[in-house]
Each structure stands twice: as structure tokens, then as C-alpha cells.
Image (cartoon, helix red, strand yellow):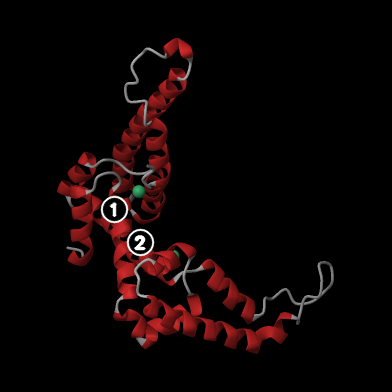
Amino acid sequence: MKDKLYTIPVTEAFTEAEGCPLCAIHDKLDKESVDYMMGPSYMEGDIRMETNKVGFCEEHYLKMYHMKNRLGLALMCDTHLQEIVKQLEKGADSLKEGKKGLFSKGSKEKPEILSFLNNISDNCYICNRIKDSFDRYVDTIFFLWSKEPSFKELVKKCDGFCFQHFVLLLDRGKELMSKESYSDMVDTLVPEQIRVLKELEKDVAWFIDKNDYRHKDEPWGNAKDSVERTLKMMTGSKVE
Ligand SMILES: [Zn+2]
Ligand SMILES: [Zn+2]
């Protein structure tokens, strides 16, 4: 049996989640990671060394800001800013070396300082942390699908997947699963996703028709919130 650390939360999400179970796993990881960051973790040297180098994305800066631990955030910001200044001072001259202009000859290699700065722009300590765990949960889904018939039944009964996570399962599953298990998963997930998408499309089409005065007295059916439900399906997030 694979590590219970991963199988239990996966089984729980597929049993309890309202909506996409992978969104539920992701939301839980997100909340736990922000709580962890604003807990005592920022006082741990090895974690701070990483956050100094990587920083955070806008979404996670804001989530931490709203946790109201301004001092904790200040401590992390302080050493992160120090690290940026230190690297800029050390690497500024190397920016001018090598390639001189668009068509001039010279090394195309990027100076280290640019990689350092790009890493801060493109990365986030919390996003990276979530991704590591999330990937392991996704791998656990493939494991359980192949080994546990009862899990397959849980998947069949769940509320279905948002588009992003549906694609992720198809994409990563193709890489990681045996041909037989993958075919079995495709035969289960794809027809169900097509059914849900067709249903949504029908509701959106009726929403459009209802805006025509000729249909104004006919019942809405499920069309009224069909645009919101389509956005939720495509993004995984709740559109109010
Ligand atoms: Zn999702
Ligand atoms: Zn982030």
C-alpha cells in the first residue's frame, strides 16, 4: 500500500468534495501552506534561506498579508530585500558583459544575476511547495486507480473535474500509467466529461436564446447560472 500520508487525503477529497476533488486538494494545500508560512516556519534558517532567494507571487504575498502577522511578514521581507541588494551589488557589472546588442557578436549566456532575478519574478516559495505535494497526490490517484477497485467507484461517483484538472489527469496519466490502466481511465473520464460539457453548452445556448424576446416567457430551466458554471468548470474557481 502506498504511503497513507497521500492515500487518505486523496480518498477523502474524492468522497467529500463538492465540485472538482483536485481543486479541493489544491485549496487545502494552499491554505495549509499559507498557515505554515505564517507560523513559526519563517524563523527556521533553511526555509528563510529559500524564501530569500525565491520570494512569493502576488497571490501569496496578499494571502500572507491578510493573515495579520505583519511582523512575520516583515522579517521575511527584510532578509529577502537584503539578498536582492547583495546579489545586485555583486552582479551588476556582469550584466554589461557578453552580448552587446541585437546583431553584435558576443556570448549569449545569461549572467548569473539575471537568472537570480528571473527566478524571483517567476517563482514563489509557497506555489513551489504546493506543487511538490500536489504532484504527489496526483500520482497517488494513478496508483489508486490501478490498484484499488473501490477507488475507481469513488471517482465514478464524484462531482467530476474542472477542465484544468481533467487535462492534467489525461496528460500526466499518459506519462505515468500502464497502457491498460490509462485506457480504462480514459474510457471512464472522457465520456463523463463530454456529457457534462454538452449539458453545459446546452444550458449556455438556452441562456443566449432566452435573451431573445421571442423566448422571454419560457422557463429558464438550468440556464440562468450557466455562464457562471462554465467559468467555474474552465477555471476551477467559484464565480459569484
Ligand atoms: Zn479542479
Ligand atoms: Zn505563489
Q: What residue is pinned by disc 2?
A: 135
**Horizontal side of residue 8 vs 208, given as left or right:** left
- Viewer-proximal residue among 30 and 198: 30
Residue with the most extreme top position: 214
- Vertical relation: 132 (above or below) 203: below
**Horizontal side of residue 188 vs 52, given as left or right:** left
Q: Which residue is drawn at 29% across and 38% down?
A: 188
Residue with the most extreme left position: 150
**Horizontal side of residue 99 vs 110, given as left or right:** right
- Viewer-proximal residue among 48 and 218: 218
Q: What residue is pinned by disc 1?
A: 24
Residue 30, percent across and down?
34, 62
Q: What residue type is labelled 1?
A: Ala
Q: Does the residue labelled 1 lie within 8 Å of ligand 1?
A: yes
**Horizontal side of residue 97 vs 9, given as left or right:** right
Disc nearer the start of the sequence (2/1): 1
Q: Does the residue labelled 2 lie within 8 Å of ligand 1?
A: no
Residue 164, percent across and down?
41, 47
The secondary element bearing badge 2 is classed as: helix
Q: In which quarter of the image is residue 47?
A: bottom left
Q: Which residue is drawn at 38% across and 85% down?
A: 46
Quarter of the rendering occupied by the C terminus: top left
- Viewer-proximal residue among 28 and 60: 60
Report crowding for label 1: few under 14, some 14 to 19, many 20 or more residues within 10 A (C-alpha). Answer: some
